[in-house]
């Protein structure tokens, strides 16, 4: 089981979340993903997460459940605060 630790509190991430993310993102689980990469099959779905958490907490959760990788966490635009998101999309 994966845990997220913030401010001394441990919040367990449900055991089914990571597998569900993999199924949505890749159409299969991680064991099959290795086989997919050798066959040149790439993921077809970009997953987005919307949360009211602090941006650093949101990034950590996204990495722990497999929405983004450690290498992706610092990419421009990978994570946005609500204020930046509203600036980018304009008036709605």
Image (spheres, rainbow, N blue to C red):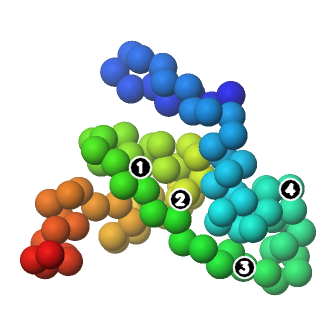
Which residue was labeled with disc 3?
42
Q: Give the labeled residue for mark 2.
A: 68
State the residue at coordinates (81%, 83%). Answer: 40
Q: Quadrant of the N terminus?
A: top right
Task: Count all numbered tags in the image, as a single digit.
Answer: 4
Distance of label 3 from label 4 (alpha carbons): 14 Å
Q: Which of marks 2 and 1 is nearer the N terminus?
A: 1
For disc 4, the marked residue is 31
Measured as percent of width and height from the top left, residue 45 is found at: 60, 74
Task: Give the quarter of the image for residue 25.
Answer: bottom right
Secondary structure type for disc 2: loop
In-image side of 86 versus 62 (left or right): left
CB-based contact (under 8 Å), mark 4 and mark 1: no
- The answer for how far apart the CA atoms under marks 2 and 3 are is 15 Å
The residue sitting at the top extreme is: 8
Choose top left, top right, bottom left or bottom right for residue 38. Answer: bottom right
User: Which mark is on residue 59?
Assistant: 1
Residue shown at 36% from the left, 55% from the top: 50
First in sequence, mark 2 or 4: give its number: 4
Q: Tell which residue pokes out farthest to the left in this image.
A: 91
- Circles 2 and 1, Cβ within 8 Å, touching? The answer is yes
42 sits left or right of 69 in the view: right
């Amino acid at each position: 089981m994966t845990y997220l630790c913030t401010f001394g509190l441990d919040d367990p991430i449900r055991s089914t979340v990571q597998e569900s993310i993999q199924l949505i993102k890749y159409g299969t689980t991680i064991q099959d993903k290795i086989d997919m990469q050798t066959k040149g099959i790439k993921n077809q779905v970009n997953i987005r997460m919307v949360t009211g958490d602090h941006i650093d907490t949101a990034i950590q959760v996204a990495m722990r459940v497999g929405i983004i990788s450690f290498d992706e966490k610092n990419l421009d635009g990978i994570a946005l605060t609500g204020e930046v998101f509203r600036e980018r999309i304009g008036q709605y």
